[in-house]
Image (cartoon, rainbow, N blue to C red):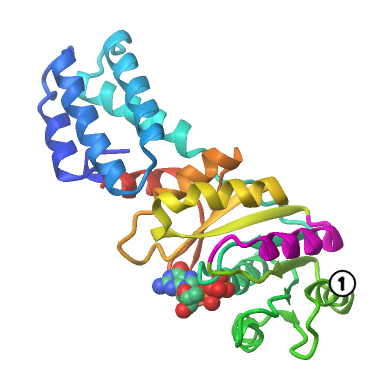
Amino acid sequence: MVLDDLGNSLRDSLGKLSGQSRVTEEDVEEIVKEIQRSLLQADVEVSLVMELSDSIKERALEEESPAGTSARDHVLSIVYEEMVALVGDSTEIPLEEQTILLAGLQGSGKTTTAAKMAWWFSKKGLRPAIVQTDTFRPGAYDQAKEMAGRAEVDFYGDPDEEDPVKIARDGLEATSDADVHIVDTAGRHALEDDLIDEIEDIERAVDPDRNLLVLDAAIGQGAKDQASQFDDSIGIEGVIVTKLDGTAKGGGALTAVNETDSSIAFLGTGEEVKNIERFEPSGFISRLLG
Ligand code: GDP
């Protein structure tokens, strides 16, 4: 991370340290305050912000800067290391046969993400298929089919079948030539019991290799409940943050990662099938601190 990755105020506070060989408690307080301000604005949960602040403060004051390193660069590297520890590395997604189940609330971007991920796997040389089990949202079938067409990947759905578990089973069978199965599920507006029951049933039928939680970057403080409920019911191995092309910074994803003891797998950066990126900590950290 370089200074340019940071927001103006934080850059200024760190800039003041240039030429200094030591940092004072006052310097550290000012820097930590700027970091707190950015992270809270990015919707990172207060307790996480406090934890991070404490570790940065402690290390910046206790650790000697290595010979030849300015106080500014030393503090900057501590900030970066502590942020990486919080954000985590990208969720491992092996390029092999697998079944992935997508969970999330309605509108979070699951259907779009299923097509994006399928496109991503196809570019890696695998043969993906999307299985669309959302019988709840009108239009989900058509949207998924259309997007699968745009991604040029296999697709299964059944607009006449009401049982999502049957669709999931039939879908896996019908697309057995595919290497990677991405199973899209229904969302609801809130975490209702029937949503949780349904996804548990699908999970049992599909027996996925990993369950990924799709979260809108603007989710903010609501991330905690969602993450913990989906984690309790099916177990969450990774998070996908969508709509990062908007203004939201996606700090809620950190809450979800912390809550589910997982990491971030992918980022969604637009409405097209190609608008997907593998998560990479430094860009995300710059965004949170920018
Ligand atoms: P689902 O209900 O969870 O399946 O959500 P959808 O996939 O239908 O997405 C809801 C809306 O968000 C749609 O209008 C999508 O085009 C839009 N959307 C999804 N991902 C992104 C993204 O990364 N960026 C933008 N700008 N829009 C997105």
Instruction: Give whichever of 104, 29 is nearer the camera.
Output: 104
Amino acid type at image mark 1 = Arg
Above or below, 47 relative to 191: above
Q: Is residue 197 magenta-colored?
A: yes
Q: Is residue 109 magenta-colored?
A: no
Q: Looking at the image, which residue is at 63% across and 89% down? A: 142
Instruction: Give whichever of 43, 266 is nearer the camera.
Output: 43
Horizontal relation, residue 249 to residue 13: left or right: right
Instruction: Give whichever of 128, 166 is nearer the camera.
Output: 166
User: Which residue matches tag 1?
Assistant: 169
Q: Position of residue 19 (x, y in %)?
A: 11, 20
Q: Position of residue 126 (x, y in %)?
A: 73, 67
Q: Kindly indicate the quadrant of the structure image that contains residue 199.
A: bottom right
Q: Position of residue 85 (x, y in %)?
A: 47, 31
Instruction: Give whichever of 128, 147 is nearer the camera.
Output: 147
**Can residue 288 be seen?**
yes
Horizontal relation, residue 161 to residue 251: left or right: right
Q: Secondary structure at mark 1?
A: helix
Q: Which residues are magenta?
A: 190-208
Above or below, 285 relative to 193: above
Q: Looking at the image, which residue is at 75% across and 83% down? A: 157
Q: Looking at the image, which residue is at 20% across and 45% down? A: 7
Q: Position of residue 221 (x, y in %)?
A: 41, 49
**Can residue 89 be seen?**
no
Q: Kindly indicate the quadrant of the structure image that contains residue 153.
A: bottom right
Above or below, 253 relative to 153: above
Binning the other alpha carbons within 10 Å of mark 1 as few (below 14), some (14 to 19) or many (20 upward) gives some
> Quadrant location of the N terminus?
top left
